[in-house]
Amino acid sequence: MVSTAKIKSVDFYRKIPRDLTEASLSGAGLSIVAALSMMFLFGMELNNYLTVSTTTSVVVDKSSDAEFLRIDFNMSFPALSCEFASVDVSDVLGTNRLNITKTVRKHSIDKNLRPTGSEFHSGSTATELKHDAEDDEEYGEGSVSLNGHSFDRVTHLYPILVVNFFAPWCYWSNRLKPSWEKAANIMRERYDRESDGRILVAKVDCTEEVDLCRRNHIQGYPSIRIFRKGSDVRDDHGHHDHESYYGDRDTDSLVKMMEDLVAPIKLDSQMITSDNSSTKLETGLKRPAPVTGGCRIEGFVRVKKVPGNLVISARSAAHSFDASQMNMSHVISSFSFGKTITPKVMSDIKILLPHLGRSHDRLNGNSYVTNPRDSTENVTIEHFLQVVKTEVMTRSYKLVEEYEYTAHSSLVHSIHIPVAKFHYEPSPMQVLITENPKSFSHFLTNVCAIIGGVFTVAGILDSILHNTMRMVKKVELGKNF
C-alpha cells in the first residue's frame, strides 16, 4: 500500500505556512489591480464569444432550371379599370403569359385608393366574339343617341336601359354597329317605347360625350352596359351601379340578351321593375361593371430566373383603347422577389446582419403619377430592377434565402397603349453569407490564459517592486552588500 508521504511528494502546489508569509500594502494594491484586469479581460473575451461573426463570399448562382422566382406585388392604379386590367409576363426565352388571373386579385378603388366593394372577378370571356358577317346590307338607326342630359333622364324612365358606349374610330365599334342597330330595331318593334316602355336600346359617342363616358368609367370601346331603374341609380359620386355584357355581338345574341332582360318585367307594371331584378343571363355573359375607375392589383407570379418583364396594362381581345386617355399612374404598396420572409425570421437575420433586408422592398411606398391633361399623353412608366440572391447559412445550419434589388424608374413616351412595365434582371452571381461557429473549448482556454497570465504578470511585478523597496531601505541604512 502506497504511503501518504509518497503521495504528498508529487504535490505541485506545496503550501507555505501562513506565519512565514508577509502581507504588504504594495501587494494588496497589485492584487486589486490584477483582479480588476481579470474581470475586464474576461468581459472582453465573453463579448467576443457571444458576438456573431460572418464570412461573405460571392459565388455563381447554382439554381436549377426547374427553380422559379416568385414576384409578390400590391399596386394601386387610380385610373385603370379592373374590367380591362391585365397582368402579363414575358422573358428572353420566349415565355409570354397574358392576363394572369389564377394568382392575381383585383379590387375596384376610388381616386383616393379606397376599396369600393368586394373583389372584382373578370370571369372568362371568349377569345373571339361572334359578329354579324360584314356585308352591304342596309339597316336603319334603331338605337337612341344619348347625351349627358338625356342619359340622366332616361335612366329614371325605363326599367331596362341597354347602352352601347362606342368610338367612331374604333374597329370593334364599327363591327358592332350593324348588329346593334338591327337588334335595336327588332326590340323597338316588339317593345314599343310608347306603348310598352320596358326597355330602351341606346348608344353614346364617347368622342363627343367624354364626361358622360368618364363618369361611367368607360375605358374600352365598345362597352355594352345594362342599367336598371331604381336600384342602379345612385346619388353619391354621380355614378351608376350597372352591369357589363361580354357575350357575342351578332344580332341574334344581342336580341336574346335583351329579351332575357325584359322577360321578368310585367307589361302591366310598365315603369316598375319586377321583384326579380337580378335576372341571370348565361354564365359569363353579364357581370357587374366596376363602380369606380381605379383598380388595386395584388398577388404573385412565378417566373424563370432569366431577364424578363412584368407588365400591367389594359387588354382585351374585343375592345379598343384610346392611348391618349390611358393613364398608368400607380402607387406601389409592396413589390418583392422570393418567398415571403416572416417578421420573426427577418428580425433574427437583422441581429446577425443589420444591413440585410434594406433593399428587399426598394419600391415599397413609391408613387408614380402622370396627368394626361398636362401634355403627358401616351406615357409608359418603366422600372428597371436588378435582382441579387442572398443566402444566409446560420450556425444551426438553417438556410435563409432572400432577394434584394436595385430600382431605377423612368417615364417613356410611346405611340402604343401606355403600360406599367417592370423589367427584372436576375444576377448570375449570388451572395453567400455564412455564420462562423465559435468553439466553447477555445473560449475556456482563453479564459484560463487570462487568469494565469494576469496572475503571473502580477507576481513578477510584485517581486520586482518588493526587491526594489528592500534595496532602497538597505541603502538608506548604509548597509553594504
Image (cartoon, helix red, strand yellow):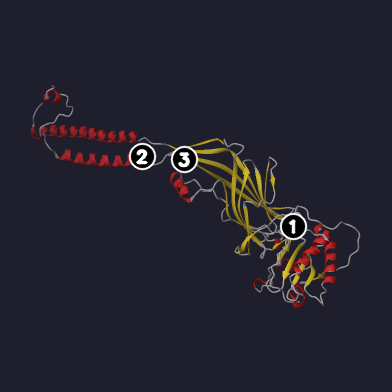
Q: On the image, numbered disc 3 is attached to which residue? A: 398
Res 145 quadrant in image: bottom right
Q: Secondary structure at mark 1?
A: helix
Q: Earlier in the sequence, mark 3 or mark 2?
A: 2
Nearer to me, 269 or 415: 269
Q: Who's the residue at 33% across and 36% down the image?
A: 443
Q: Is residue 297 left or right of residue 208?
A: left
Residue 176 in the image: state x and y as whole percent.
Answer: 82, 60
Q: Secondary structure at mark 3?
A: loop
Q: On the image, numbered disc 2 is attached to which residue? A: 49
Q: Is residue 161 left or right of residue 3?
A: right
Q: Quadrant of the C terminus?
A: top left
Q: Which mark is residue 323?
A: 1
Q: Is residue 185 left or right of residue 283?
A: right
- Badge nearest the viewer, 1 or 3: 3
Q: CA distance from mark 1 to mark 2?
A: 64 Å
Q: Is residue 119 left or right of residue 151?
A: left
